[in-house]
Image (cartoon, rainbow, N blue to C red):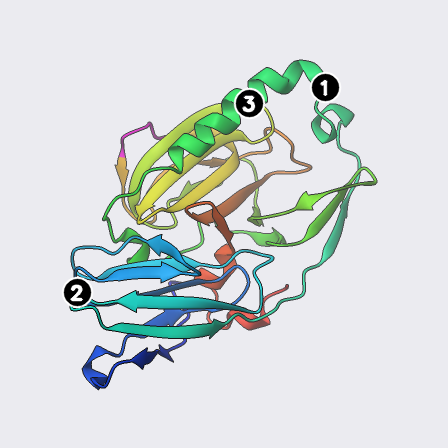
Amino acid sequence: MKFIPKILITLLFVTASPAMAVELSGTPAQGGMVWGVTEPGAVVTLDGEAIMVGPNGNFVLGFGRDAGASAELVITHVGGARETQTITIKDRHFYIERVDGLPPKTVTPPPEWQERRARETGMVREARSHLTGALDWLKGFVRPAEGRFSGFYGSQRILNGQPRSPHYGLDIAAPIGTPIGAPAAGIIRLAVPDFLLEGGIVIIDHGFGVTSTLFHMNSVDVKVGDTVEQGQQIGTVGKKGRASGPHVDWRVNWRNVRLDPILLIEPEPMRAPF
């Protein structure tokens, strides 16, 4: 089922013309994505940092797991008029999860893995660095595989008793070989069958710096440069890399900001586990 949670926010603007008001859609929460349309040529900033505005005035932004209570959005129009809004960001509670029984080398990679990990993380950064005007992110997202949600964004994982950084994906548990489809259309920027910790990994560019990353895949059925449609098979579920069982880990980024995939697919996202 496809669903785009929508919360409308009317901007408070420093101008006398109500025609300039901009509507925002999305989920203004930690891990949430928000988007809108302004006049072409306008400059949009979030907390003072410029963000991309498309030729038709589209823009998108996101808030990380540890985002503060508010953010300031400013739109400067071609004629110089400015409108501004302090966006209230919903605070969320995140679970602590324990995962035991993992091979020690996948919890604390040995020193000899450092060079390989540096190379792999560099490939991920490069794949997420593209900034195109594609609007595939605006057409909505679907879950990439059928199965049980087994891990949630923002949760703190304790691996073999050792606290680790928060989990930034949505895990979907399913048997090995279960098809994985593209959550949204886009261009394949990375497709590798055997990353050290991620196993089979695919990164899809949806435009405007919005990407989906899927890993622990048993097979990778696409290559860099391929254009995929929403739901098109890109691989199959596996348990390669650091995984305690077969599942696909789906992650969504807006530029370098890690977003919560469940907020893009659940009809009532605030009822989802946090």
Q: Residue at x 70, y 17 (%)?
A: 111
Q: Position of residue 177 (x, y in %)?
A: 50, 35
Q: Nearer the viewer, residue 173 or 257?
A: 257
What main secondary structure does the magenta stretch of the protein show?
loop
Q: Position of residue 253 (x, y in %)?
A: 45, 48
- Looking at the rendered structure, the kind of residue marked 1 is Pro
Q: Residue furthest top?
A: 112
Q: Helix, strand or loop at disc 3? A: helix
Q: Nearer the viewer, residue 43 or 39?
A: 43
Q: Which mark is residue 110?
A: 1
Q: Which residue is mark 3?
A: 118
* Mark 1 residue crowding within 10 angstroms, few (<14) / some (14–19) / many (20+): few
CB under 8 Å between callouts 1 and 3?
no
Q: Helix, strand or loop at disc 1? A: loop
Q: Is residue 4 shown to the viewer in this render?
A: no
Q: Helix, strand or loop at disc 2? A: loop
- Looking at the rendered structure, the kind of residue marked 3 is Ala
Q: How many numbered discs sit on the rendered protein?
A: 3
Q: Position of residue 160 (x, y in %)?
A: 81, 37
Sooner in the amino-acid sequence: mark 1 or mark 3: 1
The CA span between labels 3 and 2 is 43 Å
Whether 245 is drawn above or below 27: the answer is: above
Sooner in the amino-acid sequence: mark 2 or mark 1: 2
Q: Which residue is mark 2?
A: 78
The CA span between labels 1 and 3 is 13 Å
Which quadrant would the C terminus be assigned to in this image?
bottom right
Task: Identify the magenta region.
Answer: 221-226
Left or right of residue 181: residue 216: right
